[in-house]
Image (spheres, helix red, strand yellow):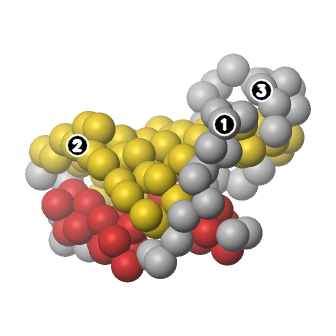
Amino acid sequence: MKDAADYLAHVKSLIILNPQVEHWQITRETIEDDMGLFRYRLTLLDGSFLEMFERFQIVNGEAQVSKYSFHWQNANGQLRKRWDNAAHHPEISTHPHHLHKNTEDNVTPHKPMTAEEALIVVTATM
């Protein structure tokens, strides 16, 4: 990646080319040289939604994600999974990275995630 705009183009291409994505919208997008952030809302073919948020910086051609949240819910609004790195679960061994599964209270350790990884995981289960 040469800059933040290049990384955003990469993420958008992953969304557009994914056959499980029915519709998507840009909620927020900011680019400033090698830094950026985005918030996208994807509607998937099964009616579920994936809210994707990342704040990142391009360092030596690589996107380094400093803040993220990938919130996947079914068509009825029930949480399926949310990966994030909010620092509100210090008891988790992978703090601040963690996963909420099926409910807000079911919090488990998880490795850091990226938009690309979240999109792969979510659409592979469909």
The crowding category of the residue bearing disc 3, from other C-alpha atoms within 10 Å (few below 14, some 14 to 19, many at least 20), is few
Q: Of callouts 1 and 3, which one flags the residue occurring earlier in the amino acid sequence? A: 1
Mark nearer the viewer, 1 or 3? 1
Task: Say which amino acid is labelled 2.
Answer: Glu
Q: Which is nearer the eye, 38 or 74?
A: 74
Snapshot quadrant of residue 102: top right
Residue 64, given in percent of the width and then of the height, sits at 42, 56
Camera-side residue of 44 and 2: 44
Query: Image height check: is 34 above or below 12?
Result: above
Q: Which residue is mark 1?
A: 76
Residue that lies at the very extreme toward the top in this rendered image = 88
Q: Is residue 108 above or below residue 124?
A: above
As measured in the structure, the alpha-carbon distance from the residue carrying label 2 to the one carrying label 1 is 27 Å
**CA separation in Å, label 2 and label 3:** 27 Å
Q: Is residue 1 above or below residue 63?
A: below
Q: Is residue 11 left or right of residue 116?
A: left
The residue under label 2 is 29
Determine the CA span between mark 1 and mark 3: 16 Å
Residue 1 at x, y percent in the picture? 26, 73
Pinpoint residue 46: horizontal percent, then vertical percent: 61, 60
Disc 3 designates what residue? 104
Query: Does the residue at mark 2 contact the one at mark 1 (Cβ under 8 Å)?
Result: no
Q: How would you rate the neighbour count of disc 2 (Cα within 10 Å): few for under 14, some for 14-19, many for 20 or more?
A: some
Label 1 neighbourhood size at 10 Å, few (<14), some (14-19), many (20+)? few
Whichever of callouts 2 and 1 sits on the residue coming sooner in the sequence is 2
